[in-house]
Amino acid sequence: MQNLLSDLQAIVGSAHVLTEGDLSAWTQDWRKRTSGRALAVVRPASAKEVAQVVKACADYLAQRPQSGLSIVPQGGNTGLVVGSTPDESGRQIVLSLQRLNAVRGIDPANLTMTVEAGCILQTVQEQAQAAGFWFPLSLAAEGSCTIGGNLGTNAGGTQVLRFGNARDLCLGLEVVTPQGDIWQGLSGLRKDNTGYDLKHLYIGAEGTLGIITAATLKLYPQPKAQLTAWAAVPSMEAAVQLLGLAHQHLGASLTGFELMGQFALSLVARHFDNLRVPLYQSSAFCVLLESADAESEAHARAQFEGLLEAALEAGCVSDAVVAENLTQAHNLWHIRESIPLAQALEGLNIKHDISVPVSAFAAFVASTDAQLVQAIPGVRLVNFGHLGDGNLHYNVQAPEEQDAALFLQAQEAYVNRIVFDAVQAHGGSISAEHGVGSLKVDHLTRYKSPVALQTMRAIKQALDPLKLMNPGRVVRLN
């Protein structure tokens, strides 16, 4: 494959075709579950270079199908389902989009912003704010994840309740196809009924149908006030009841509704003693609420106070605190965002990113908790997530006296079957916002409609007949 590598060096420059040294930043997944081996890490600096790289690889594969060459597109490499790192074959090109990091422009009248795929999410947020606007996609990895990765996985985060997933915040895309062509679809139009909406094929496809190189994103006016509250609730049923009251009292200003189980918060208290976790020791769950008000802070505070008074009277909240300033609000959110890190410090664990209808939340948690506790004495359940949009990170920690690595090796398949069967029984999905990647691709044959899988395979075969783009992720062709 030396001739191919020479061609790639001619396209992007020798310094940006990496084949030696420590490549673990590109070849190891964020959770450090797997580590692959790349033929090369290629770092183009423009959509044109991406297209030339893809075309060179497509031509090589067409002439030498036995080579097994393929491309793994990669953004910030913060994914949780092993969807953006190479396998162990040494025949995959990791195509890093990190050098495509320009903000191409902001259209204030159209409330849009066009950015390249390698832009860090936090940079997009800051650039929007500097221009007087708000880009509301927000998640724990925002300091390192990229817009291309966010769109490739249809990322969710903490404000899906009001603004939707990454898909709902995107109006147009620029995409390099598996043949090395560039589709210029960076329209800022909110209405365009001229056939299939192609951008929705690529959003959530995890780089299996093409490579997103730029996107036109929706912007919003900055709110006049943002308030954060932390409430202790006695049960999952009470949390669902509180959500209903929040919708009634806050309406469209409700932007965040995060649920955190007592054990999840106890891990934060144990591993981050600098964080003061409020109200968790005497409550089964705590809820973090956020309101973004378009009128004033006084209006926002009055709404929040009305909500909490009604919740206390209804008995679905036992106690609550409202952040008095931005520092306090930041500290409360920092506690929520520290749960995954605290769980990692506690030891290896089995992660689930599931969704069920909000109305089924309480029944799902009660029945699945009971099954796991009965099946695995001493098992510890780390429940937290975005209750407002039906997304729960239902994670399973080994019993304290059991070796975590052995627990994963012996129990992961069994635990997944219990959890995924329960998700299906409650009308849910086994992947809410993290994607499918390679970790969940084989589960889809059991939990995804055969008609849906057949259609997905037909789309993949039609758009990528050479199987060049991220094979073995999202859907398998054989």
Image (spheres, rainbow, N blue to C red):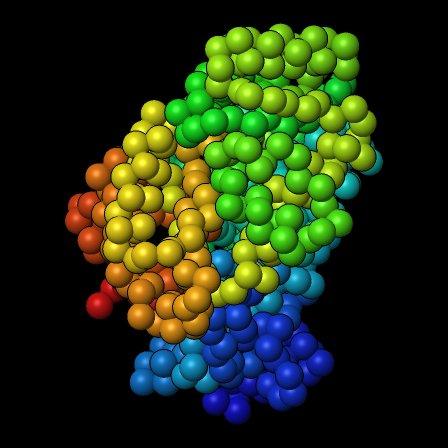
- The answer to whether residue 192 of the structure is visible from this angle is no
- The answer to whether residue 445 of the structure is visible from this angle is yes
- Front position in the image: 46 or 310: 310
Residue drawn at x 48%, y 78% as measured from the top left: 36
Q: Is residue 186 above or below residue 87?
A: above
Quadrant for the C terminus in the image: bottom left
Image coords of residue 404 (percent x, y): 44, 68
- Front position in the image: 275 or 158: 275
Image coords of residue 429 (percent x, y): 32, 42
Q: Quadrant of residue 405?
A: bottom left
- Front position in the image: 216 or 254: 254
Relative side of 317 to 58, left or right: right
Residue drawn at x 30%, y 51% as measured from the top left: 372
Q: Is residue 142 above or below residue 390?
A: below
Residue drawn at x 58%, y 51% as measured from the top left: 267
Image coords of residue 302 (percent x, y): 70, 8
Residue drawn at x 41%, y 83% as measured from the top left: 89
Relative side of 174 to 89, left or right: right
Q: Quadrant of residue 422?
A: top left
- Front position in the image: 463 or 278: 278
Point out the residue furthest to the left here: 450
Total numbered labels placed on residues in the image: 0
Point out the residue furthest to the bottom here: 2
Image coords of residue 203 (percent x, y): 46, 46
Q: Quadrant of residue 360?
A: top left
